[in-house]
Image (cartoon, rainbow, N blue to C red):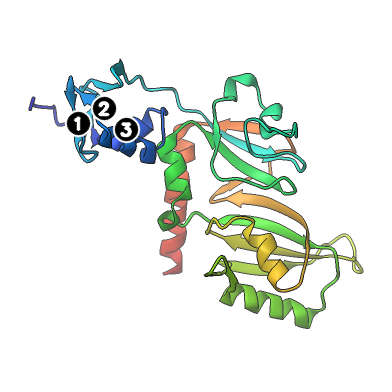
């Protein structure tokens, strides 16, 4: 094996492919396993093989060219879906974005009736790291019920959701929950909670409240890790650089350390 200068960074082959933006790391593993990847003209089937920028990578005989990574913070409005196209002709998030960002993939989803913060990128490694449970990326939601819930019932809701309810055969819990009292009125016909979770169960929050007998009228994701929608309006986006995007992992590590 040729000597590599010490200042040349190496990465596992599957990670290097994912970082190119071509495919996710899981898909990269499959490409490697099936013998479709060459390193310096040699087929490699071990995804733990270390490579650097000095190595020539090919997939199906074509050179692997790293794509420029883009990272967007996007405020998804209600009544649109988190997908590229819809067979029913419903509005999608990509109708709010310039065509130059049509190749970006959402990091997780929000259902049609929900609104709030989405991350979009073509960085497969970043997507996997954000979504992987071990990285414990917190997501904060504003949850609105269309009834006023008395304080005794509020306490029951909080205790139940912290201890957990059964969803899909598992105990689904919130990381934290508190009631938010609106400052614009005393007698409102709704109850608002701030809920923080890190799991990714489908329609988790709506279903958890439904188990307790409550219907969620409004669901808005306000934060993903350290990122917030406070400077965005519905349907608008903000592009961030790679350093800012990856800072989400540093901020979550600090949060965990401060609570230990």
Element on which disc 2 rests: strand
Please name the residue that numbered disc 1 is placed on. 44
Residue that label 3 marks: 31
Q: Nearer the viewer, residue 136 or 167?
A: 167
Q: Is residue 48 left or right of residue 199?
A: left
Q: Residues within 10 Å of mark 2 (few under 14, many from 20)?
A: many
Residue under label 2, please give it: 37
Q: Is residue 149 left or right of residue 226?
A: right
From what the image shows, is residue 160 above or below residue 92? below
Q: What's the residue at 53%, 58% (across, down)?
A: 198
Residue lying farthest to the bottom in this orientation? 152
Of residues 35 and 159, the one drawn nearer to the viewer in this rendering: 35
Q: Do residues under tags 2 and 3 come within 8 Å of each other at their CB atoms? A: yes
Residue lying at the far top of the rendered structure: 62
Residue drawn at point x = 22 percent, y = 41 percent: 48
Q: Left or right? Give the position of 8 relative to 60.
A: left
Separation (CA) of disc 2 from disc 3: 6 Å
User: Where residue 140 appears, x then y in whole percent?
Assistant: 62, 56
Q: Position of residue 39 (x, y in %)?
A: 20, 25
Q: Secondary structure at mark 3?
A: helix
Q: What is the distance, in whole Å, between disc 1 and disc 2 at their CAs? A: 6 Å
Residue 229 visible here: no
- Residue 3: x percent and y percent? 8, 26
Q: Left of 27 or right of it: where is 41? A: left
Disc 1 is placed on an element classified as loop
> Which corner quadrant of the image does residue 53 belong to?
top left
Kindly check if marks 1 and 2 are in contact, taking CB atoms under 8 A apart as contact: yes
Q: Dot 3 surroundings within 10 Å: few (below 14), some, or many (20 or more)?
A: many
């Amino acid at each position: 094996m040729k000597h590599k200068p010490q200042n040349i960074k190496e990465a596992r082959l599957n990670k290097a492919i994912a970082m190119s933006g071509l495919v996710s790391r899981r898909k990269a593993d499959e490409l490697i396993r099936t013998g479709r990847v060459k390193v310096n003209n040699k087929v490699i089937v071990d995804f733990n093989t270390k490579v650097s920028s000095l190595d020539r990578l090919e997939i199906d005989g074509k050179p692997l060219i790293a794509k420029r990574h883009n990272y967007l913070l996007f405020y998804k409005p209600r009544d649109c879906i988190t997908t590229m196209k819809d067979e029913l002709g419903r509005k999608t998030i990509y109708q709010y974005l310039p065509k130059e960002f049509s190749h970006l993939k959402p990091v997780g989803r929000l259902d049609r009736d929900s609104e709030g913060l989405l991350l979009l990128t073509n960085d497969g490694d970043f997507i996997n790291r954000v979504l992987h449970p071990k990285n414990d990326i917190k997501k904060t939601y504003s949850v609105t019920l269309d009834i006023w819930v008395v304080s005794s019932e509020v306490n029951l809701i909080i205790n139940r959701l912290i201890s957990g309810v059964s969803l899909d055969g598992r105990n689904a819990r919130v990381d934290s929950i508190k009631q938010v009292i609106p400052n614009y009125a005393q007698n409102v016909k709704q109850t608002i909670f701030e809920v923080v979770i890190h799991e990714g169960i489908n329609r988790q929050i709506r279903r958890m409240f439904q188990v307790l007998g409550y219907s969620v009228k409004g669901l808005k994701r306000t934060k993903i890790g350290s990122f917030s929608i406070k400077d965005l309006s519905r349907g608008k986006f903000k592009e961030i650089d790679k350093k800012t995007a990856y800072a989400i992992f540093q901020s979550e590590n600090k949060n965990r350390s401060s609570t230990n």
